[in-house]
């Protein structure tokens, strides 16, 4: 891997530039990150405030994400780019620098919907769905969480029973990203043989997706309740290689990996916004950036951002080389989301009253990160996952 990075321009350093982050990436990784960043800055950033305020995400963005090549980009074949894990992580970072809703869309599409079919599906399921999902011509969602079963998905009440050669699914899923936009849902259900996964076209009779309104977080993202009322599916809808709860949990690990990088994008954008504001805002006839207390905040946040990036990059290299464990992913998600949220909140203080408007990103990022903190594994569950690895005792059972 080459470590030669472009020479920086003169002037104040940007947060990850101070770390020399680009020297740790190869040319392809830098190019992918730069391409996604340009797309975010030119296409998404000018509109995100409006989408956040109106609580919408245009469905047509799916095809634009497909053309960008980020949908299922870390998967092989079926129109997927087949990049390494680090490149996928960097794309997640750049997307979340725009908004957590963008990274959530791409993450659910690629690491949950597509990954579940790619890893556990039949050849027919893969050939039918994956090329369409990769291009954005179809949208997918992932139905695991239920109203009463988030951290304990093994207690799910959604049931699949056999009726001749068919399956009948009944139950409710909650907090499902992309649910109202989706053409296909991967739904997990209890059966007489244990947990199984099913590929459910959303136009199947008995399937309903209800939007969740009045959200204070992840507003530029579609979140839904899925209701399955005696949904009849052919035997071919079952994911043939998915056996037990380990299957959906492996999909969640894929998505959590993207969050490890993604949360840093929200933190970086918040910090860059605060740096620019502090440089131009004058207080007592001096730039806000010239005060010691402001510089202390900026330096501390840059340090935590850099540490988080090194942790994410290390986990990405492990994933590419020898594999990464769920406990290691827990380390990354716990630290990076927690620190990103703290950075976004601190950046808001530098912006003063201006920071509560949608003209500036930190409070929007902080609001979004409140959701990222608890979805796909709460901080408490990641702490206990790490604790179990250290002690051998499962404190949550």
Image (cartoon, rainbow, N blue to C red):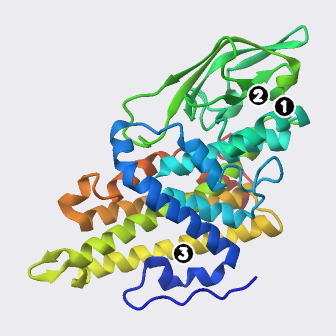
Q: Is residue 384 visible?
A: no
Earlier residue among tags 3 and 1: 1
- Across and down, in percent, residue 59 comes to 53, 36
Q: 23 left or right of 192? A: left
Q: Is residue 376 above or below residue 230?
A: below
Earlier residue among tags 2 and 1: 2
| Towards the viewer: 392 or 51 | 51
Q: Residue at x 42, y 58 (%)?
A: 341
Query: CA gap, disc 3 to disc 1?
Result: 39 Å
Q: Where residue 199 is drawn, which disc sits there?
A: 2
Q: Where residue 307 is drawn, which disc sits there?
A: 3
- Residue 298 falls in image quadrant: bottom left
Query: CA gap, disc 3 to disc 2?
Result: 39 Å
| Towards the viewer: 382 or 35 | 35
> Around disc 1, counting alpha carbons within 10 Å, would you say few (fewer than 14), some (14 to 19), or many (20 or more)?
many
Earlier residue among tags 3 and 2: 2
Q: Residue at x 66, y 52 (%)?
A: 385
Query: CA gap, disc 2 to disc 1?
Result: 7 Å
Q: Residue at x 59, y 35 (%)?
A: 150
> Around disc 3, counting alpha carbons within 10 Å, would you say few (fewer than 14), some (14 to 19), or many (20 or more)?
some
Label 3, secondary structure: give it: helix
> Around disc 2, counting alpha carbons within 10 Å, would you say few (fewer than 14), some (14 to 19), or many (20 or more)?
many
Q: 366 left or right of 59? A: left
- Across and down, in percent, residue 141 comes to 64, 34
Q: Which residue is mark 1?
A: 239
Q: Where residue 81 is drawn, which disc sits there?
A: none
Label 2, secondary structure: give it: strand
- Across and down, in percent, residue 151 comes to 61, 38
Q: Residue at x 84, y 37 (%)?
A: 127
* Label 2–label 1 contact, CB within 8 A: yes
Indicate the quadrant containing the N terminus: top left, top right, bottom left or bottom right.
Answer: bottom right
Q: Nearer the viewer, mark 3 or mark 1?
A: 1
């Amino acid at each position: 891997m080459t470590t030669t990075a472009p020479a920086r321009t003169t002037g104040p350093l940007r947060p990850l530039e101070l770390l020399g982050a680009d020297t740790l990436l190869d040319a392809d990784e830098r190019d992918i990150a730069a391409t996604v960043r340009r797309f975010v800055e030119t296409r998404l950033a000018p509109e995100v405030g409006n989408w956040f305020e109106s609580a919408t995400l245009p469905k047509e963005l799916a095809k634009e994400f497909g053309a960008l090549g980020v949908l299922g980009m870390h998967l092989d074949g079926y129109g997927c780019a087949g990049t390494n894990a680090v490149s996928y992580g960097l794309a997640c970072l750049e997307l979340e620098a725009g908004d957590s809703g963008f990274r959530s869309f791409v993450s659910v599409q690629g690491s949950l919907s597509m990954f579940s079919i790619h890893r556990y599906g039949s050849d027919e399921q893969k050939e039918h769905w994956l090329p369409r999902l990769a291009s954005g011509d179809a949208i997918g969602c992932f139905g695991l969480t239920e109203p009463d079963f988030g951290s304990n998905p093994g207690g799910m009440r959604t049931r699949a029973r056999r009726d001749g050669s068919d399956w009948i699914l009944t139950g409710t899923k909650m907090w499902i990203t992309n649910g109202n936009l989706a053409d296909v849902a991967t739904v997990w259900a209890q059966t007489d043989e244990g947990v199984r996964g099913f590929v459910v076209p959303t136009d199947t009779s008995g399937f309903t997706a209800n939007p969740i309104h009045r959200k204070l977080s992840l507003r530029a993202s579609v979140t839904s309740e899925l209701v399955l009322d005696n949904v009849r599916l052919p035997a071919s809808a079952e994911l043939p290689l998915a056996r037990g709860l380990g299957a959906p949990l492996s999909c969640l690990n894929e998505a959590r990996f993207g969050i490890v990088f993604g949360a840093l994008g929200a933190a970086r954008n918040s910090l860059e916004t605060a740096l620019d504001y502090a440089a131009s805002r004058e207080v007592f006839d001096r730039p806000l950036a010239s005060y010691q207390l402001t510089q202390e905040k900026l330096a501390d946040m840059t340090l935590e951002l850099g540490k988080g990036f090194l942790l994410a990059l290390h986990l990405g290299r492990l994933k590419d080389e020898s594999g990464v464990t769920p406990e290691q992913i827990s380390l990354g998600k716990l630290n990076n989301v927690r620190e990103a949220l703290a950075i976004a909140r601190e950046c808001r203080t530098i912006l003063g009253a201006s920071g509560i408007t949608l003209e500036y990103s930190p409070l929007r990022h902080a609001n979004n990160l409140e959701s990222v903190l608890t979805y796909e594994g709460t901080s408490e569950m990641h702490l206990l996952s790490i604790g179990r690895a250290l002690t051998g005792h499962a404190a949550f059972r």
